[in-house]
Image (cartoon, helix red, strand yellow):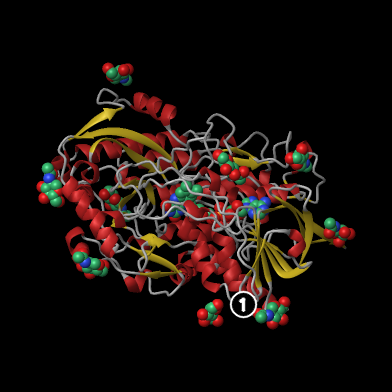
Amino acid sequence: MNMKISHFLVAAAALLVCNSGAYPDSAHKAQHFTRSDQLHSSYDYIIVGGGTSGLTVADRLTESGKYSVLVIEYGYFSDIPGEPYDPVNPINTAPPSLMYNITSVGAVKQFVGVGCVVGGGSAINTQVWMRGTSEDYDRWAAVGAQHSTWNWDGILPYFKKSCTFYPPDPQLAAEFEITYDIEKAWGGTGPIFASYAHYQYPATKVMYDGWKVIPGIEYPKDGSEGKAGIFWVPSSEDPRTETRSYARTAHYDRVQNRTNYSIVTGYKVIKINFSQKHGDITATSVKITARNDNSSVGTITARKEIILAAGTIHTPQILQLSGIGPKSVLKAARIPLVLDLPGVGSNLQDHSWFAMGYDLQTPILPNRQSLTSNKTFADWALDLWKTNLTGPYSIVGGGGALAQVSLPVIAPEMFSSIASEIEAQDPASSLPDSEDPTVVAGYHAQLKVMAAAARSNNTAWMQMGLGGNPFGSADQWGFNIHPLSRGTVHLDPTNPDGEPLVDYRMLSNPIDLRVAIGLFKGLRTYFKSQGEMKKLSPVETKPGANVTSDADIGAFLAATLNPSEYHPVGTCPKMPLAMGGVVDEELTVHGVQRLSIVDASIMPLTVGATTQSTVYAIAEKAADLIKREFAKV
Ligand SMILES: Cc1cc2nc3c(=O)[nH]c(=O)nc-3n(C[C@H](O)[C@H](O)[C@H](O)COP(=O)(O)OP(=O)(O)OC[C@H]3O[C@@H](n4cnc5c(N)ncnc54)[C@H](O)[C@@H]3O)c2cc1C
Ligand SMILES: *[C@@H]1O[C@H](CO)[C@@H](O)[C@H](O)[C@H]1NC(C)=O
Ligand SMILES: *[C@@H]1O[C@H](CO)[C@@H](O)[C@H](O)[C@H]1NC(C)=O
Ligand SMILES: *[C@@H]1O[C@H](CO)[C@@H](O)[C@H](O)[C@H]1NC(C)=O
Ligand SMILES: *[C@@H]1O[C@H](CO)[C@@H](O)[C@H](O)[C@H]1NC(C)=O
Ligand SMILES: *[C@@H]1O[C@H](CO)[C@@H](O)[C@H](O)[C@H]1NC(C)=O
Ligand SMILES: *[C@@H]1O[C@H](CO)[C@@H](O)[C@H](O)[C@H]1NC(C)=O
Ligand SMILES: *[C@@H]1O[C@H](CO)[C@@H](O)[C@H](O)[C@H]1NC(C)=O
Ligand SMILES: *[C@@H]1O[C@H](CO)[C@@H](O)[C@H](O)[C@H]1NC(C)=O
Ligand SMILES: *[C@@H]1O[C@H](CO)[C@@H](O)[C@H](O)[C@H]1NC(C)=O
């Protein structure tokens, strides 16, 4: 299967060879196992999923040397396609061997991109390193319990802790207005590296400056200080080696000396086992089965806690397989009910996007095509890369500028009526039929804060990459980064052990189409604007200048919108139980002891940003919560 990942800041990656061979076990190394009979029968903590969040938490819990941790990962240790990427080809072919094979159900059939490898999504993603605005996180507290610390002030320290920031080269920074604010946004020494490319193409600056004539637009000093606007973002790239910095390198390879840090690969958790005494439900052990030998099974006990980090698609599946979820879903799949928890698998959100075609008729040279069309340039670029790890080949997926624009600025004529429509909407009308009243109540609370967001200049609602295709005839992508539609992840009643049914339910809330029309018109205004954009002489080729009425634009968008930027979140939301929540403020599953969730599924509302750095911050904060909890025991 050839998977096209139409991502906005994209790079082409070679397919790679899957290396499932075992690491040599050694007394001085973290233990890597490939067979269940090599494992102990119990560990202090069991972490389900060795992806972005799972390895981060495993690292932090083994730091003190006081606890033993076992990570269970379905994927293998595999080499990841390295640099140089092919910056000419704007299609990133993510390695199918390192991903799950899931196609969404419902109106839109879409490949569901999820990493299956040690490192999870962070091993195969496009490396954009950014945060949402402060309001994105303040809304998490607003729909949370009283005195929630899951707001901007409560998560910023963990954003800082998670990474080490490297400023851009001074000369490049001056030329391209790459500004940053170490005090407000960075300053940590965490093991993920955030760094900038050592080169940029001149047309990216034209597209960056083009926004200056759009009324209300801002250019914050650093987008990572919680602001909307136009800015440059770093990538999760180790500047010392110009290689990917990700959960495996940062939170496993770096700390391999820890004998209490164990990982078993090629195994899947298929069930959590509970003890039930006096009405208390306590998670005790997990049942695992081997990927390539389903007769190899095992049960491993957690002395302290089981931590779910299997991601937005698989964490709700594991809960449902274990008897925790909406009772109708469990009944259909013939899973014995342990606890009716209606929110499990509800509230799925992703960023949706549309493509407009533009012919940028005045090329500004050099551009990415120069790497194939101009031998002098290409030789220079390759030489710089080989001798110095700089030049055009140091541009990886996320090394560019972004437009992160609020609804009042991108859709000045529509934002106010959109906000009123959100306020007036019956929350049950766009959720699945006979949705549980608690889930409806939670969604109602979400709509209230999103109505305010629609009127705010500091919630970015539209995302556009400015370094994506600044040449020739190309697609220009606009992303709706705050969709109101909510999807589901439920067991397949005909095959509960297979992949779950992922239904994005795109446009199930009709206001999302109105928003998309607003974003589309705003982007058209930008491309037609009379500032710097004139230098590129853009001519719209798709859908074309004759498509002007809201009805015609809406028809184009309804037919072409894509539900996913590979940023699924929200299926086990951190919200109160009475609001359809699955985890509490400590990230413990409501109604269950010694079971917590630390991955992207806990976001109650998605953030207006690519999701990885938020996942790392959640995991850093989760590790502190988990450590504090058991320090008391
Ligand atoms: C192609 C792609 C491009 C992306 N681009 C960007 C980007 O440029 N910037 C950005 O910020 N974000 C990006 N993202 C999103 C980001 O990578 C994810 O949000 C993040 O990695 C999710 O982390 P997680 O810990 O929730 O889950 P994951 O990292 O997916 O980890 C879950 C792990 O659990 C394992 N697992 C699942 N089920 C089981 C089970 N039953 N038993 C054992 N193990 C199991 C999986 O194999 C996986 O390794 C991208 C994602 C993809 C897929
Ligand atoms: C490993 O963890 C145990 C607790 O399970 C602890 O007693 C021991 O000191 C740890 N050992 C090391 C080397 O970290
Ligand atoms: C998905 O399919 C590819 C083949 O295209 C395969 O290599 C990979 O192992 C599959 N992923 C999973 C999780 O089974
Ligand atoms: C938000 O931006 C719009 C459009 O530029 C402007 O009219 C409005 O005054 C701004 N609102 C605030 C609160 O800054
Ligand atoms: C980890 O082990 C390596 C060699 O195996 C050694 O060089 C290094 O100093 C060790 N680090 C720590 C922190 O013990
Ligand atoms: C599951 O838990 C119950 C109750 O503690 C116990 O009797 C049973 O043996 C456990 N099953 C497994 C497979 O560990
Ligand atoms: C286990 O694997 C065998 C052989 O691949 C297959 O026939 C069988 O259906 C599998 N069983 C389960 C429970 O998946
Ligand atoms: C090719 O690249 C070189 C070096 O960047 C540049 O000087 C030259 O003008 C380019 N030639 C063309 C035809 O663009
Ligand atoms: C090599 O890289 C260094 C560090 O990025 C930079 O300062 C220097 O200018 C580069 N040399 C060349 C010849 O580009
Ligand atoms: C716009 O023009 C194209 C090409 O002529 C045509 O296919 C399309 O139907 C037109 N759309 C509208 C809304 O008029």
Q: Quadrant of the C terminus?
A: bottom right
Image coordinates for residue 454, horizontal then vertical, percent: 40, 47
Which residue is label 1 attached to?
28
> Is 2 placed left or right of 471 in the picture?
right
Residue 271 visible here: yes
Would you say the beta carbon of the disc 1 residue lies within 8 angstroms of ligand 5?
yes
Q: Please, is residue 532 above or below residue 263 in the view? A: above
Give me the residue at 24% from left, 59% from top: 384
- Camera-side residue of 546 and 318: 318
Q: Please, is residue 424 above or below residue 82 in the view? A: above
- Camera-side residue of 114 and 17: 17
- Circle 1 crowding by C-alpha within 10 Å: few under 14, some 14–19, many from 20: few
**In which image quadrant can residue 582 be found?**
bottom right
Query: Quick one: SS at disc 1?
Result: loop
Q: Please, is residue 506 above or below residue 211 in the view? A: above
As drawn, the residue found furthest toward the right would be 278
> Is 75 placed left or right of 469 in the picture?
right
**In which image quadrant can residue 553 be found?**
top left
